[in-house]
Image (cartoon, rainbow, N blue to C red):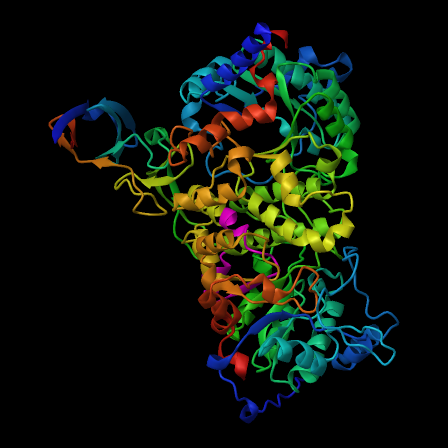
Amino acid sequence: MAKHVVARREEIPPGGRKIVRVAGREVGVFNLDGAFYALKNVCPHQGARVCLGRIVGTALPAAVYEYTYGREGEILRCPWHEWEYDIVTGESLFDPNIKITSYPIEIVGDDIVVTIGE
Amino acid sequence: MTLVIEREATFVDRVAALRLVDTDIHNDLPSIEALRPFLAKKWHLWLDSGGPGSATRYYANMGSGRMDDAVNEDDGLAAGDPEWVVQQLMTKYRIDIGVLTGSTIGLGIQHDYHIQAAIASAYNEWTLATWVRPYECFKGSIVCLGSDPAASAAEVRRLGQNPGMVQVLMASAARIPYGNTCYWPIYRAAVEHDLPVAIHVGSEGTGIANPPTAVGYPSTYLEFHTDHSQTMMAHCVSLIADGVFEELPTLKFAFIEGGTVWAPYVMGRLDRLYPALKAEVPYLKMRPSEYLLRNCYFSTQPIEEPDDHQQLLQMLRMMHAEKTVVFASDYPHWDFDNPLMAFNFFPADLKRRIFVENAVELYGPRLLESNRGA
Amino acid sequence: MSTIAPTSRPEDRTDTLATLRAIDVDLHHDIASWQDIAPYAPQGLRHRLTRPGGPPLARHGFKIIGPRFGEAPRPTDANGRAGHPAVDPAWVKAEYLDRRGVDIAILTGPILSLGVQPNHDMAAAIATGVNNWTLETWIRPFHCFKGSILVAHQDPAQAAAEIDRLGDDPGMVQVLMGSASETPLGRRQFHPIYAACVRHDLPLALHIGGEGAGMSPPATAVGHPTTHFEWYGSLPQVYMAHIMSMVTEGVFEKFSTLKVVLYEGGIFWLPHIMWRFDKNWKAQRSETPWVNERPSAYIRRHFYHTTYPLELSSQEELAAVLEMIEGEQTLLFSSNYPNWELGDPFAMIEGLPAALRRRVLVENARAVYGERLLR
């Protein structure tokens, strides 16, 4: 387990993201309303650089023929097969067992620090 | 004597050196204006008017419909620049030869077959000039209209000897199933030039084409996309049942982007029906499944993904995938299959057949001929 | 329209569900003459059924060319001519059911295109007439026959009314609709029909055969087939479209107890459909946010399939496909009597392992149709 400084806090404003290379892999760092999240830039499906996908909302669970759009800015859509992932947990919306690897992240002073295990 | 042996060894060696043949790359036409140099002057008024009217479909993807990470900032397209495609697809995914299917497959479902036939011809010339002659790694398709068999047969004959073109390509969206004798002029022209005919999904329910299913229009894109394979199945049954493969035993027919493992249903059901119903199709001399296995090819994409990989391999065995299945990426569409990952559980020999050898058999020696003479 | 009062005689039933040898879910009883049906149809339209040639009914031109009925038993008349194998219930019981060890047969009749007939009221009147006639002449006098409530789905209100009229009749065990349709059956206009089905705890049977008739689109998504062979080979594609529609339109979310039986479609296309549908749903899920589970979960849970005709295959291939689709629970024995041109229906399942064969012959139908089978 090692901690890595990946960016300065002001580099990633709320709603923003940065792709960084750390410990031999690409990681996407996301700022959701001031909270930071780090996801490995590999989709568990076929290996796409998932963190480059659109950050969107989604249609919320609904009764038949009802449409409510929500969670704007919380969902990462893989740029290939459009699988929707919860940025906070890395879990896909259709099956929580299918998830993007996520890393512990903390703010130390002005630094964003990601912990990468071995 | 020595010369002949050398030539044979070279071809075999060259095939052995291939890593992957991609049977479905959708290169972009940046704008219809690009066709102007290739279009006779009498059609230029259509270009001056912004192109002919174009029926479009209702159904839309939830995302952009293409691989968002593959867009070239310079032109806003994922497949507009051949160099970009070489970099983003061919090099990255270790593809040695790619067959271009383009983005104008559905010309045959537009109403005005006069202008569409002219556009198809201009498009084919544009493909040769822009993508095929300058690049040994790309091969083209002779885009044709199912709606105008006479013009299409002429186009096939016009380009049939060109080493840069490896197949005839039509939309699977149609008014009449492809086994019907109205299309046989196209197939005869293809056979004369040893060209396979490929059909590709996408334009269902649009323009002059039938509804996307035999029971009308689905409501959603989710259904529409999943329903695509039904047009493939219907054409496959039609080609067999109307005796196309009996009449033209060397015709190879490829089903592109319609999914793969529906073929066992066609084989099994038609073989169950045939002994009792053969009087209705007296021109057939073999079992239906024998025609399918001899004449038909099926692209992998989008590859079906059961949780249990072995089940996919079981279905592939039923349809003799070692002979009938060819790899397709569908770059740059959203449902692209990554060849570096999606087939890793395949037995090595089957994967080799699907990645290279079946495509070589489908397209023939032309696949490896230089494009310099194209 | 009044119902025909049931006159079942429970004291005559000596069998129980446990002693059944075989349940045949698909017996096409036939109509010898529309004059027979007319008295059972609504009074105002009776005269349309008695016209020469029967009621106006659009037909397609796809028919079997060559000998009919295969090795199905045939009655002979006084002149030694072969008669129709399915017009006389007593004869059918003696010569088919008793000889072959079938205890219960579900009647599905000869009309498969009712839902694409242009006149809603004529179609509904034909359904009512056929249902009433079937009850009185086939079902009431015989324990071995059970019926399907035939409905014309192009007018969902009338169809639901017919289901409500007969839904609690012990002689009826399912609702029957031709799968031929102007529009996919998941659409909301048809939901009142499904509501009626579940109100009465009745499975819904869909049956191919009307495709290309009347108002229906061409029988394939790419146009009209040329021969009957091509047409019949393509018809399973219709079920695929309906499955897609019913799942995406939330039919099984709204009607979680609805069972749908797909007749004569085979099963080898189900793995492709399940896997393709699941793969697309993962991507396009937000278009239909009420589809909470993988589509294949709905398909496995709600759809049943019949054995006549199964695709020609090796036993290993059949076993493999059954495992992929969980078909051990969802495959139902059907004879398609008297249409045995493709072979003997029992021979088609001969190679199944004994325990599976028993499930297919009896237990799966028990699970679908329940105690109603013996009422």
Residue B92, quarter of picture = top left
| Residue at (46% x, 58% y) in the render | C300
Depicted C93 relative to depicted B239: above or below: below
Question: Where the N terminus of chain B falls, by quadrant?
Answer: top right
| Residue at (55% x, 70% y) in the render | C197
Camera sees residue C248: yes
Instruction: Determine whether, in the image, residue B215 is placed left or right of residue C186.
Output: right
Residue B182 location in percent, x, y? 79, 35
| Residue at (30% x, 32% y) in the render | A15
- Out of B40 and B153, give the one closest to the viewer: B153
- Out of B52 and C39, give the one closest to the viewer: C39
Residue at the outermost bottom position: C11
Span of residues in magenta: C250-273
Q: Please check the rendered image and state whether residue C105 is part of the magenta-colored stretch, yes or no.
A: no
- How many numbered markers are drawn? 0
Q: Please check the rendered image and state whether residue C255 is part of the magenta-colored stretch, yes or no.
A: yes
Residue C24 location in percent, x, y? 59, 72
Depicted B222 relative to depicted C123: above or below: above
Depicted B21 relative to depicted C328: above or below: above
Residue B334 location in percent, x, y? 47, 33
Residue A83, quarter of picture = top left
Depicted B43 relative to depicted C40: above or below: above
